[in-house]
């Protein structure tokens, strides 16, 4: 019998108290020297090669003046150089921070000034163009490292190429390896390992400072309840500014000596999954929603006999998923039927996608509709929700393949305590809680109360078995003019479950009733239209297409049946624009920027309430 989550706490804590990033990298380079560590395209670095280049970059950064406690900002896509420069800074005791590549010039100015970064690392011309307007105003900035040498501005001594930094550091390390080897040994588990900026959905971003203990306790605790084999494959496709990818791609990969396949363009993640065939995969809701839309489209194109076989298999596995997801036993005859359907029909289908080896699929960062989870569950893809935030080093509660409840985000990981305030706000306490927020003067300010509890700002409920359900963000609740408290994410999730819909925003704060704006999916909507013989292809044309409107009318009506009277959507409209972090309606982690959207569509929203 497996130990309970609570029983695992002391084991996780005692191990986390001994680990740092440099120590794990040294272990991997010595014990697994020739094993693959990072693969990007046709290039693979072994653990020995990864550590050797990390040492060179660490010495090179030190020669540029980076010291213990200094901050270093990175704006770069997922590529080996990102891992290397980050690890190099950590070996000096510096605090590395990755900025989303979609940040505006104004946002870059804020995080760069607030972080007091001494060194900035940029990928190429695109990043440099957004940073140059603010560089002269950064008093703490000393050097800018650029990966693409062709983008280096001529005649500016502040700029140096990545290759130059590495080459200089390699020479220094060859002359005296003891400087590097003795330097990192002073780093302790309680020291900072990185900083992450929150997405800023409700105000200015905050610099969340994490420790080595935070990073590796998280990796240890999650692995204790959902084990991953040593040296397994993993796919890194999210920005390293996202807590999930930073934890999984940079830290958990070290702990388990994983072989990480790097996907620089998230659009190519499905192709890379087919190559890597990882045993575990984390996706933000939009990834799973797009996969569900793709499977639905594939079903539509199947010949009748094949389609009927898949639908029958899907029905059997869906029934099993619903029973397991509600804590009920699966009858033996149904279990046998589902196992046959899985082996003969669904596993070969998943193999084409590279998901046949998947033992743990998880979703987080935002709510995901139950309908999407059930649809994927019917294909044998048991996608399970987790919940956490940058301040909890990622996952704080977890559903596991053998212990889950659909519609919840699971139970606290080992060592994490959870309680609800009178208004339903979730408070957490435990070893994954961050060190604090970075203040403008460089100090780290704790955000927990006297008893160690962190107010998360999320609202939730806990059932009798200890499973947590997130109902909304405390600051995002809609309060109608009649005083009804409404969780917009519930409504938005129902609307977003349809393949036509990329994003939806529910509106109604201080209004008499709820309305909505719907943004069509720029990839799925044209496919949906083509399958129905429609000629309209652009989003603008599809937004006016009667068949699209009729489909969305039906979606809203079906959603309203499942909502209380106060939650029901009275009016909606379709926007012709695709919302994205680049255009400003979404945060880099794909959360709605409500204030921006409400301002952008103020006139259209006002028309919803003209007769109220």
Image (cartoon, rainbow, N blue to C red):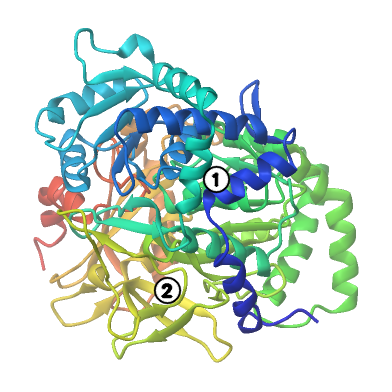
Answer with left or right where residue 59 lies relative to residue 533: left
Crowding around mark 1 (Cα neighbors within 10 Å: few <14, some 14 to 19, many 20+) is: many
Residue 249's disc is 1
Image point 80% across, 78% down: which residue? Answer: 330
Q: Position of residue 434 (x, y in %)?
A: 38, 65
Residue 43 at x, y percent in the picture? 63, 22
Residue occupying image coordinates x 72% and y 72%: 402
On the image, the x and y values in percent for residue 225 come to 67, 70
- Residue 16 against residue 69 in the figure, above or below: below
State how many labels appear. Answer: 2
Between 557 and 489, the one nearer to me in the picture: 489
Q: Residue 580 in the image: x percent, y percent?
A: 32, 40
Left or right of 236, for residue 128? left
Identify the residue at image location x=54%, y=23%. 174
Task: Say which of marks 1 and 2 sits in front.
Answer: 1
* Residue 208 in sight in this render: yes
Which of the two residues, 162 or 427, is positioned nearer the viewer here? Answer: 162
Q: Is residue 123 above or below residue 600?
A: above
Q: Quadrant of residue 132 in the image?
A: top left
In the rendered image, which residue does mark 2 sit on? 470
């Amino acid at each position: 019998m497996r130990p309970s989550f609570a029983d695992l706490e002391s084991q996780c804590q005692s191990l986390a108290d001994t680990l740092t990033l440099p120590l794990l990298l040294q272990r991997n380079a010595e014990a697994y020297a020739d094993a693959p560590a990072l693969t990007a395209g046709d290039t693979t670095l072994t653990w020995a090669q990864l550590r050797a280049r990390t040492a060179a970059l660490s010495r090179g950064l030190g020669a540029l003046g980076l010291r213990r406690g200094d901050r270093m900002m990175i704006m770069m896509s997922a590529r080996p150089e990102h891992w290397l420069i980050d690890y190099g800074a950590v070996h000096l005791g510096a605090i590395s921070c990755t900025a989303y590549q979609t940040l505006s010039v104004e946002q870059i100015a804020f995080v760069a000034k607030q972080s007091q970064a001494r060194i900035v690392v940029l990928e190429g011309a695109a990043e440099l163009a957004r940073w140059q307007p603010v560089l002269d105003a950064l008093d703490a900035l000393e050097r800018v490292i650029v990966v693409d040498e062709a983008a280096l501005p001529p005649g500016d001594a502040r700029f140096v190429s990545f290759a130059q930094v590495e080459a200089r550091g390699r020479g220094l390390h060859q002359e005296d390896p003891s400087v590097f080897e003795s330097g990192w040994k002073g780093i302790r588990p309680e020291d900072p390992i990185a900083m992450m900026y929150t997405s800023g959905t409700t105000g200015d971003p905050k610099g969340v400072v994490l420790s080595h203990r935070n990073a590796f306790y998280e990796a240890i605790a999650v692995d204790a309840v959902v084990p991953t084999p040593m040296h397994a494959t993993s796919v890194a496709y999210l920005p390293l500014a996202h807590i999930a990818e930073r934890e999984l791609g940079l830290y958990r990969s070290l702990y388990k000596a994983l072989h990480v396949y790097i996907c620089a363009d998230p659009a190519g993640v499905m192709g890379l999954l087919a190559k890597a065939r990882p045993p575990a995969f984390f996706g933000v809701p939009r990834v799973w929603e797009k996969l569900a839309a793709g499977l639905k489209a594939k079903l539509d194109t199947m010949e009748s006999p094949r389609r009927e076989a898949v639908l029958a298999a899907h029905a059997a596995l869906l029934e099993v998923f619903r029973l397991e997801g509600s804590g009920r036993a699966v009858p033996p005859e149904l279990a046998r039927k589902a196992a046959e359907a899985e082996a003969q029909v669904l596993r070969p289908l998943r193999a084409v996608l590279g998901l046949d080896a998947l033992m743990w699929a998880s979703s987080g960062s935002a709510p995901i509709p139950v309908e999407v989870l059930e649809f994927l569950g019917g294909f044998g893809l048991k996608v399970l929700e987790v919940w956490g935030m940058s301040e909890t080093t990622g996952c704080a509660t977890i559903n596991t393949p053998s212990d889950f409840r659909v519609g919840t985000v699971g139970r606290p990981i080992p060592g994490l305590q959870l309680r609800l305030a009178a208004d339903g706000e979730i408070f957490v306490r435990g070893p994954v809680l961050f060190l604090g927020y970075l203040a403008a003067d460089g100090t780290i300010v704790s955000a927990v109360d006297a008893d160690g509890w962190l107010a998360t700002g999320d609202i939730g409920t806990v059932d009798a078995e200890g499973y947590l359900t997130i109902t909304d963000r405390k600051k995002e609740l809609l309060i109608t003019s009649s005083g009804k408290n409404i969780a917009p994410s519930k409504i938005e999730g129902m609307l977003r479950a349809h393949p036509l819909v990329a994003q939806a925003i529910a509106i109604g704060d201080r209004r008499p009733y709820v309305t909505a704006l719907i943004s069509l999916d720029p990839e799925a909507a044209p496919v949906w239209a083509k399958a129905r013989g429609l000629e309209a292809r652009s989003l603008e044309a599809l937004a006016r297409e009667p068949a699209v409107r009729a489909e969305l009318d039906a979606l809203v009506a079906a959603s309203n049946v499942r909502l209380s009277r106060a939650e029901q959507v009275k009016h909606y409209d379709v926007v012709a624009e695709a919302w994205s972090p680049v255009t400003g309606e979404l945060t880099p982690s794909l959360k709605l920027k409500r204030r921006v959207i409400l301002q952008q569509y103020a006139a259209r929203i006002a028309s919803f309430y003209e007769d109220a």
